[in-house]
Amino acid sequence: MRAVRLSGWGGGPALTEVGRPVPRGPEVLIRVEAAGLCHSDLHVADASPGELPYRLPFTLGHEVAGQVAALGPEADGPAVGERAVLYGPWGCGSCAHCAVGSDNYCDRRGDLDWHGVGLGRDGGMAPYVLVPSARHLVPIGDLPADQAAPLSDAGLTSYHAVAGLRHLLHEGTTAVVIGVGGLGHLAVQILRATTPSRVLTVDIREDALALGHRSGAHAGYLMRAKTARTLKAETGGAGADAVLDFVGNSATLELATDVLRPGGELALVGSGGGQLTVRKPGFLPPGFRLSLPFWGTRPELAEVIALARSGALHVETETYPLSAATEAFGRLRRGEVRGRAVLVPD
């Protein structure tokens, strides 16, 4: 079978012929129906030697949905033919966090030479992917695979970030989403579905603001020199109760801290390389809180899938055959993808 493999650091992935895996022990073989593309895939492909603990080569693809094709002799859980989405962050499986489905915060993460499916272990940009345990599978029923796959990261990460802010977002509050891309447009929908908060969006692209509007945002603003002043005016001068930054560069971090009200919280999700200086006294609003959400928990993924099946979440996607992976990666790198790119085996 052909798979999108990374065989060298900084060289980019390529379609490569590999053998179909065979499940052993508790492993589960999944026939892939769809695999999402993420900016994290670009970060991994562009990494310098030694920057990541992963051992080459491996197949990319950490947003995966498909059907159980075969079970190892010690596997339990789903039956052959059952459809599922993969919970992507794979931890040690034995620490306190992993025991409750929080592999994203595995206590032994620093000791592992992988971070999950497609991240040091073979991923879903292939016709089949091997899963080490059925505990990493969440049933999706009849949810289309091109919707389910992106929800396992873009949806789950956004949901986890919003969940950490929900205690602030009661009636009469304002949340600001910076960056309305693959994650941001889902964060808008999740905010609307799970909180009564007013949702404002910021981006540098008109089409991204239009996506935010379709996703349920109350208003959207192009990023300009006076955007912080405009956003504060929209809140009656008080500022936003919460900001979710899906970009994370210097400009967006400055905007986020400028627009937060006292006691507000910033969830920094994007990995744009910006830095935030924390000092007291300083320029940050009194009572400022910062969270660095990473992916999400397995129980939260089940909640995301339930939201999608109820009709509350819809992923804006562009679909490509697996054979066109190079084209899809190129569009993602150039910032031309609307929402989320998804690969489907030919």
Image (cartoon, grey):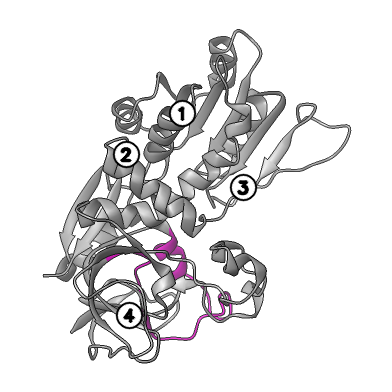
Question: Cα distance, mark 2 to mark 3?
Answer: 30 Å
Coordinates of residue 251 in the picture (x, y in percent): 58, 37
Given this view, does label 4 or label 3 mark the residue nearer the observer?
4
Task: Tell me which segment is drawn in magenta.
Answer: 40-65
Q: Residue furthest top?
A: 236
For label 2, count other residues whose C-alpha is less than 10 Å away and answer few (under 14), some (14-19) or many (20+): many
Instruction: Give the left or right position of residue 317, taking residue 120 as reference.
Output: left
Coordinates of residue 342 in the picture (x, y in percent): 24, 57
Instruction: Find disc 2 in the rendering and name its residue.
Output: 313
59 in the magenta segment: yes
Q: Closest to the observer: 159 or 224?
A: 159
**Mark 1 residue element:** strand
Question: Cα distance, mark 1 to mark 4?
Answer: 42 Å
Q: Closest to the observer: 156 or 14?
A: 156
For label 4, count other residues whose C-alpha is less than 10 Å away and answer few (under 14), some (14-19) or many (20+): many
Snapshot quadrant of residue 343: bottom left
Instruction: Find disc 1 in the rendering and name its residue.
Output: 202
Vertical order, 299 against 315 (above or below): below
Q: Which label is found at residue 274? A: 3
Snapshot quadrant of residue 80: bottom left
Q: What amino acid type is highlighted by mark number 4? A: Val
**Mark 4 residue element:** strand
Question: Cα distance, mark 4 to mark 2?
Answer: 28 Å
Given this view, does label 3 or label 1 mark the residue nearer the observer?
1
Coordinates of residue 165 in the picture (x, y in percent): 60, 36
Q: What amino acid type is highlighted by mark number 3? A: Gly
Instruction: Find disc 4 in the rendering and name its residue.
Output: 28
**Mark 2 residue element:** loop
